[in-house]
Amino acid sequence: PITAIIPGCFMSRLPLIGVTTCSRQIGLHAYHTSGDKYSRAVATAAKGLPVLIPSLADLFPPSDILDALDGILLTGSPSNVEPFHYQGPASVPGTAHDPARDATTLPLIRAAVEAGIPVLGICRGFQEMNVAFGGSLHQKVHEVGTFIDHREDDTQAVEVQYGPAHAVHIQPGGVLAGLGLPQRIDVNSIHSQGIERLAPGLRAEAVAPDGLIEAISVPEGKAFALGVQWHPEWEVSSNPHYLAIFQAFGDACRARATQRDADASNNA
């Protein structure tokens, strides 16, 4: 088995952390894709082994996926959740959707939280969490009239696009405050959609100055369950606030891995 030394601990295997993928047609063939930055953040900051989850809901029910994993990272994506999942109006023509991903992630999120498997959602993954529990989305935040434009300037270099864009205010008493994050942090902003109605049972963890919810948690969840609208995976090792999120997620995944191994040993 793959093992790693965890400072202050005994030899332990790396937790297996599922990383969601998008379904894409490239040329004549179908692919399951995920950005390199997500897997690298899992490996370097969460200290886990990234395992890509194909968007094959017709072949793998959530229980089969979750039985093999110690955590789930819900990645960002160029596509949007199809609005019928939250009773929203039809998207404008040309909007990128990924029905195979929706069919995989939405039931997977609910099952993971119910089973006590750590979950971290980023950007689309954050939006998926809200939809999975019954919330809704603004499809174009910049057209609502009460929010700033949260999209990146795609004419700029990627380092500029992912640079600090606005502040968020960390809400007291939640997961992020418990990680030691200050009341105000600066984050990047690379999204056009955002939370319209917060799902029942979810908690707002951080709010942008314009009032848009930028982070959520599941207070009644059995394990770490956090979603953020920004991209903490970007240069995670050099940003202490981003790093704290991934380290907490990794710690929760290691705790599950330890418990799974103990249960397996006891049942052997």
Image: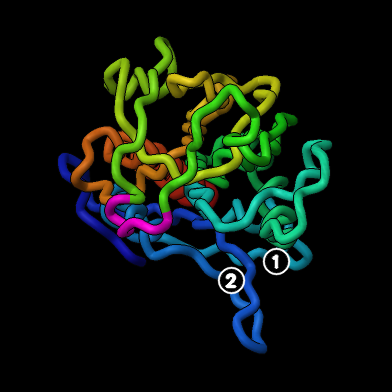
Q: Nearer the viewer, mark 2 or mark 1?
A: 2
Q: Which residues are magenta?
A: 154-160
x, y percent for residue 142: 58, 36
The secondary structure type at the circle numbered 2 is: strand
Picture residue at 35% right of the left edge, 26% below the top: 167
Pointer 2 residue: 32
Label 1: how many residues lie within 10 Å, few (<14), some (14-19) or many (20+)?
Answer: some
Q: Are marks 2 and 1 in contact (CB under 8 Å)?
A: yes
Pointer 1 residue: 56
Sequence-first tag of 2 and 1 = 2
In what quadrant of the picture does the N terminus appear? Answer: bottom left
At label 1, which amino acid type do we have?
Leu
In-front residue for pair 206/196? 196
In-front residue for pair 201/259? 201
Coloration mode: rainbow
Picture residue at 47% right of the left edge, 32% below the top: 224
The circle drawn on residue 225 is none
Q: Is residue 206 visible?
A: no
In-front residue for pair 85/8? 85
Picture quadrant where residue 196 is located: top right
Label 2: how many residues lie within 10 Å, few (<14), some (14-19) or many (20+)?
Answer: some
